[in-house]
Image: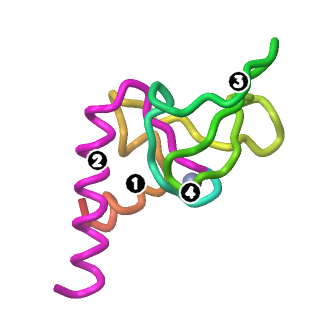
Amino acid sequence: MGANDMHRRKQAIEAQLIAEMFSPVRCNRCRGVYDLGKVEVTARYSDCTVFKTPCCGSVADDRTWKGRPDFTQIDKDDPRGGDPWLRAAMMRGEI
Ligand SMILES: [Zn+2]
């Protein structure tokens, strides 16, 4: 199996995982996908919740309005179109 096949397989698995998630997001640090509904919350503040990302173990919070958010929400109804990385892969015919 070549590197491209591996990459394609990883994307197919990821698309399947996204479909099963409660609130899928993409990590802006490592580009991993995780379920916001299943993160380990480490602190709660009045304006945000702090948690540890399951993908790379970074400390993240849910302030999507800050300059560089820790994650990008993935639209479950349009998981590929809503995500530039997945959309690009789809346009290349990889998924
Ligand atoms: Zn990550």
The quarter of the picture where the C terminus appears is bottom left
| Residue at numbered disc 4 | 56
The magenta region covers: 1-27
The answer to whether the residue bearing label 1 lies less than 8 angstroms from the nearest atom of ligand 1 is: no
Q: Is residue 73 above or below residue 93?
A: above
The three-letter code of the residue at mark 4 reads Cys
Secondary structure that dominates the magenta span: helix
Nearer the observer: mark 2 or 3; the answer is 3
| Residue at numbered disc 3 | 49
Distance between mark 3 and mark 4 Cα atoms: 18 Å
The answer to whether the residue bearing label 4 lies less than 8 angstroms from the nearest atom of ligand 1 is: yes
Which residue is nearer to you in this view: 69 or 89?
A: 69
Q: Position of residue 74 (x, y in %)?
A: 46, 36
Q: Is residue 33 magenta?
A: no
Q: Residues within 10 Å of mark 3 (few under 14, many from 20)?
A: some
The three-letter code of the residue at mark 2 reads Ala
Which residue is outermost to the left? 1
Q: Residues within 10 Å of mark 4 (few under 14, many from 20)?
A: few
Measuring 22% from the left and 77% from the top, which residue is drawn there?
Answer: 5
Measuring 31% from the left and 51% from the top, which residue is drawn there?
Answer: 14
